[in-house]
Image (tube, helix red, strand yellow):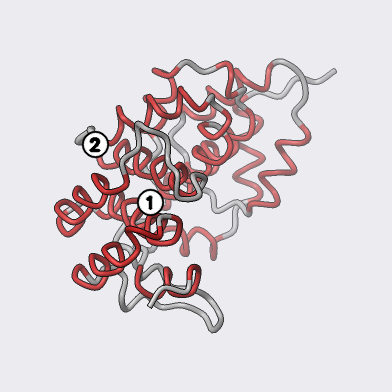
Amino acid sequence: MFAMTVQDILKQLEAMGDPARRRHNARVGPDGIPGVPEDLQYGVKTGDLRKIDKAIKGPERHDLGLELWATGNLDAQLLAILLVDAAGLSLDDLDDMVRDGRYSWVADWLQAYVIAKRTPQEKANLRERWMRDPDAWAARAGWHLAASMVAKSDGDPAPALDPAALLDRIEREMPTARPETRWTMNNTLAAIGIHCPPLRERAVAIGERIGLYKDWPVSKGCTPPYVPVWVEKMAGAS
């Protein structure tokens, strides 16, 4: 049986690349997060990445994923996230990956397909570790976990998660936070407004005062990430 190598996969990714997608990926997003340099991506569509993922079988998937991750190429890292065994990574491995994945697509996939599979206690430990970190991407990951934990709490968060204290930090830090971190801090603010009714008024007031993403362009029928509008739509807050 033919075993694929990293070079085989990179050639396949390159052949699937789309110039229009590369240009789109290279743009700076409206949130201010830098785009992906064209020499660090091929512009592969998500569906094509999933086709390659399904074609790679066997125990070599994990090691291939690690090798692809090490290339620093956007498409290779996205594919790597699908290939690696989440349970086969130590918490230090995850910490390194969070710091290496310097693009929002990679950060979001890493959360959805790898970090989300860890135990609740591991995620709580990572959240505390990353939310204190000066690295913008590590902090982004920590606030992402905070937002997720608040959203799953139904107004009764775990003892280690204090939504009022989170609001204190958001109010103090979000106006000057790096764009990478600011995005998930804002998600946490919205989650508190939606899922913690006693704190809803304060969360909305913070969103109004800071005004983050107030002018965010959205398609008709979509909810903008501006917290006062987001909370009102999701929780009926006024």
User: Residue 31 or 169: which is nearer the viewer?
Assistant: 169
Q: Residue at x 44, y 61 (%)?
A: 194
How many C-alpha atoms fall within 10 Å of the one at disc 1: few (<14), some, or many (≥20)?
Answer: some
Q: With 63 as the anchor, is 102 left or right in this view?
A: left
Q: Say which element carries label 1.
A: loop
Q: Looking at numbered disc 2 in the image, what kind of residue is underneath it?
A: Asp
Residue 94, how many percent across, how many down?
44, 25
Residue at far right of view:
1
Dot in front, 2 or 1 = 2
Q: Say which element carries label 2.
A: loop
Residue 186, how many percent across, how many down?
33, 57
Q: Residue at x 24, y 69 (%)?
A: 205
Q: Which residue is mark 1?
A: 37
Compute the Cα span from label 2 to label 1.
Answer: 21 Å
Q: Looking at numbered disc 1 in the image, what kind of residue is underneath it?
A: Pro
Q: Quadrant of the N terminus?
A: top right
Residue 52, how many percent across, how many down?
72, 39
Number of marks present in the image shown: 2
User: Residue 10 or 83: which is nearer the viewer?
Assistant: 83
Q: Which mark is residue 135?
A: 2
101 relative to 186, above or below: above
206 relative to 96, above or below: below
